[in-house]
Image (cartoon, rainbow, N blue to C red):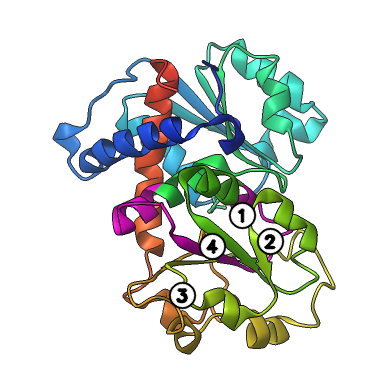
Amino acid sequence: MSKDFLGIKDLDKNAIMTIIELAKQKKQEIFNNSFRKKILKDKTLVTLFYENSTRTKISFSVAGQYTGMNVSDLDVATSSVQKGESLIDTAVTLDQMGINYIILRHQQTGAPHLISKYVKASVINAGDGSNEHPTQALLDFFTIYEKKSSFKGLNVTIIGDINNSRVARSNVIGLKKLGANVTFSGPTTLLSKGMEVLGAKVSYDLKDAIRNADVIMGLRVQLERQSGMFPSLREYANIYGISSDLFTLAQKEAILMHPAPVNRGVELTSELVDSSASVINDQVTNGVAVRMAILELLQFGGF
Ligand code: CP
């Protein structure tokens, strides 16, 4: 049993299902203040984000507060990181204050794994470079399970900037363990054939990839991680943007997912984002529930 949660790689199918089942309970607590169990009262959580975030950072803060914790955010932009303090020294400094959880997002692959060796606190990976975003994948699994009841034989198509996507990596690793079929689709410059090694089928034909899918997951075009990979956003939207018309090729009850933030009109049309097939807002709520479950399980040795 690890003190940390660093990647979907480290979870087996049973551990994933344990988190989903506990998240189901936690979801009931979210909108019922009196029902929230302050199970982590007197514990302390710090968010340490070297990259921008709305959903992950705030949902960890909220999950910490809902479970009774003291929560602080270390604002990297105004911290001693700007004076040149290293990641390890920053983490050790927090650890010396008796922090119980460090939630780290960092642009460098392996950053959470590195600091976990230096601190007593539980380290949770909130996204490391293009490696993993494990809590995002878990909220995605919970959302799929809520809507589809099972993963076995489910066709999940993930579309867009796959090479740069830690969300795609964590999702394919977990979805394969859960018994789903995963297809990656996107332009050749954003989707290397070698990504098949992760267990997904690679298709450069968008219509083919969408046809018969039960779950369509669009990914944000990560302009901050690459340049010159396609001529223009308009061109990307014309060729790989998902519209309501394209979506009709999927299964009748297919759902639309996206980790967000969405570049409306680029990877998804606005009409599709706001359609009844979209579960993007459910993903946000489920993110709080999943993070509450992970915080609790790490404290009480659940996975
Ligand atoms: N999905 C996700 O990680 O969103 P944020 O960057 O807003 O945390």
Residue for point 67% across, 55% down? 165
Count of marks, rendered view: 4
Q: Nearer the viewer, residue 280 or 145?
A: 145
* Disc 4 CB within 8 Å of nearest ligand 1 atom: yes
Q: Is residue 150 magenta?
A: yes
Question: Residue 20: image x %, image y %?
Answer: 36, 39
* Element under disc 3: loop
Q: Is residue 24 magenta?
A: no
Mark 3 or 1, nearer chain start: 1
Residue for point 79% across, 57% down? 194
Residue type, mark 1 in image: Ala
- Distance CA(mark 3)–CA(mark 2): 20 Å
| Quarter that holds the C terminus | top left
Residue type, mark 4 in image: Pro
The relative height of residue 279 versus residue 296 in the rendered view (above or below) is below
Left-right relation of 182 to 302: right
The relative height of residue 262 versus residue 240 in the rendered view (above or below) is above
Q: Which mark is residue 80?
A: none
Q: Is residue 120 visible?
A: yes
* Disc 1 CB within 8 Å of nearest ligand 1 atom: no
Of discs 3 and 1, which sits in the foreground? 3
Are discs 3 and 2 less than 8 Å apart at CB? no
Name of the residue lying farthest toward the left: 34
* Element under disc 4: loop
- Distance CA(mark 2)–CA(mark 4): 16 Å
Say which residue label 1 marks. 168
Q: Nearer the viewer, residue 37 or 139?
A: 139
Q: Which mark is residue 261?
A: 4
Are discs 1 and 2 less than 8 Å apart at CB? yes
The residue range painted magenta reads 142-169
